[in-house]
Image (cartoon, helix red, strand yellow):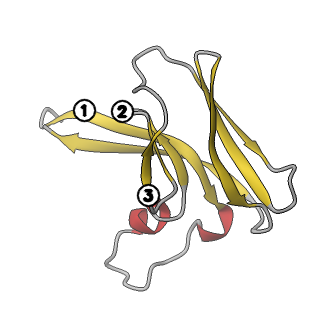
């Protein structure tokens, strides 16, 4: 569609237990339920978000960049989520992800942006 000029992409994790959950209002878009409950890196600006806050993390990514993501759940209380860009470690993005909450799934978001 020529009215859309760019796409916004993010990659991260989401608790598996909320996948497929219906929101309280069936007319409400479930994307917001997911967005408020995921840990993600936004590729367009290099910012990270835990669903409640947005903070600087790394430089914006560009075409051809290779992203690696690692979820380390070896600690019984809190997990960490880290990223690499073009094999360069960017450090721990999140270090207080509750391990006891169970399983997480890879979550990639592709959002079309107007003009």
- In the displayed structure, 20 sits above or below 73; it is below
At horizontal 60% and vertical 69% (from top left) the residue drawn is 18
The residue tagged 2 is 44
| Residues marked 1 and 3 touching at CB (< 8 Å) | no
Sequence-earlier tag: 1 or 3? 1
Residue 35 — which label?
A: none
Looking at the rendered structure, the secondary structure element under dot 2 is: loop
Residue 53 — which label?
A: 3
At horizontal 56% and vertical 69% (from top left) the residue drawn is 20
Looking at the rendered structure, the secondary structure element under dot 1 is: strand
Q: Rate crowding at label 2 as few (under 14), some (14 to 19) or many (20 or more) other CA atoms within 10 Å.
A: some
Task: Identify the residue at the far bottom of this view.
Answer: 24
Residue 13: x and y in percent read 61, 50
Residue 107: x and y in percent read 56, 48
| Residues marked 1 and 2 touching at CB (< 8 Å) | yes
Residue 37: x and y in percent read 53, 64
Looking at the rendered structure, the secondary structure element under dot 3 is: loop
Q: Left or right: 37 with respect to 89?
A: left
Q: Which of 40 and 31 is in front in this view?
A: 40
Quote the CA–CA distance across marks 1 and 3: 24 Å
Report the number of discs. 3
Q: Which of 23 and 43 is in front in this view?
A: 43
Q: Left or right: 59 with respect to 15?
A: left
| Residues marked 3 and 2 touching at CB (< 8 Å) | no
Sequence-earlier tag: 1 or 2? 1
Sequence-earlier tag: 3 or 2? 2
Quote the CA–CA distance across marks 3 and 2: 17 Å
At horizontal 66% and vertical 69% (from top left) the residue drawn is 17
Residue 63: x and y in percent read 40, 17
The residue tagged 1 is 6
Q: Quadrant of residue 4?
A: top left
């Amino acid at each position: 569609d020529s009215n859309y000029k760019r796409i916004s992409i993010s990659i991260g994790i989401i608790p598996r237990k909320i996948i497929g959950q219906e929101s309280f209002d069936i007319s409400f878009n479930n994307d917001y339920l997911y967005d408020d409950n995921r840990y993600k890196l936004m590729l367009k600006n290099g910012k990270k978000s835990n669903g409640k806050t947005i903070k600087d993390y790394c430089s914006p990514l560009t075409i051809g960049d290779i992203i690696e993501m690692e979820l380390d759940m070896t600690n019984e209380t809190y997990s960490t989520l880290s990223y690499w860009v073009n094999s360069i470690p960017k450090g721990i993005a999140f270090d207080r992800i509750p391990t006891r909450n169970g399983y997480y799934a890879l979550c990639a978001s592709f959002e079309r942006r107007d003009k």
